[in-house]
Amino acid sequence: MLGEGILKGLAETAKNFAGSYVSKERLTTVQYPEERAPSIEATRVFPFLVYDGPDWQAGLRCVACQICEKECPPKCIYIEKSHDKKPDYVGKQQFYPARFDIDISVCMSCQICVEVCPFEAIKMDTEFELATDDRFGGLLHDRQQLAKSNEYFHRIHPTEAAEVDGRLAEEKAKADAKAKAAADAAAKAAAAKAALPTRGGD
């Protein structure tokens, strides 16, 4: 029949329109802020820095490699590398950010910083209530404001966080095995050297 497709489309539109008033799943309006719609796991707002353990300063995964700063399209990330080093999550001595700021008034939530980070140190937050009457300083977040625990990461992005923990655990196991093999080899070499006969008078 001529126009059958148009009639079907109009019927589907009418069905969706009517359903949006009676279907609980379709009622998207909530009385904010008293009511809040649950955020979905794929939500991304602004970046935050992940740290392990109870101390955010000691546990920051960031090693101040500055890749995210260089790759950021709007150039809203500012990093200053430390002059000393501290052990990272695998015990390797690494630099850390003496300063790590993000200007969220400039950030466009593109997630490029997350994609290029080789240390799983920066992820996207779901928090959006960041309005402030301080137009400049209030929207420039420093490393303490950006630092959030790995437990928090698991709460907002459980699937991704579990995958990241799995990769980090695998890397740590490889590093531990390599260190153990090197220590065993050194011990064997020392034992072999000690077992060599010495010449008299030496």
Image (cartoon, rainbow, N blue to C red):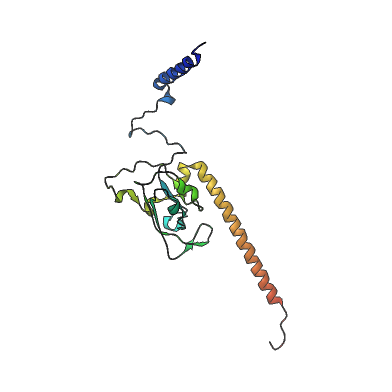
Residue that extends furthest to the left in the rendered view of this protein: 133
Q: Position of residue 90 (x, y in %)?
A: 54, 58
Going 47% across and 52% down the picture, which residue do you hit?
A: 121
Residue that extends furthest to the front in the rendered view of this protein: 2
Question: How many numbered circles does the render carry?
Answer: 0
Q: Is residue 155 left or right of residue 33?
A: right
Residue that extends furthest to the bottom in the rendered view of this protein: 201
Q: Position of residue 6 (x, y in %)?
A: 47, 16
Q: Is residue 201 left or right of residue 142?
A: right
Quadrant where the C terminus sits is bottom right
Q: Position of residue 93 (x, y in %)?
A: 50, 63
Going 56% across and 48% down the picture, which residue do you hit?
A: 166
Going 68% across and 69% down the picture, which residue do you hit?
A: 188
Among the 4 quarters of the image, the one containing residue 131:
top left
Above-or-below relation of 123 to 38:
below
Residue that extends furthest to the top in the rendered view of this protein: 1
Above-or-below relation of 33 to 66:
above
Q: Position of residue 122 (x, y in %)?
A: 45, 50
Among the 4 quarters of the image, the one containing residue 130:
top left
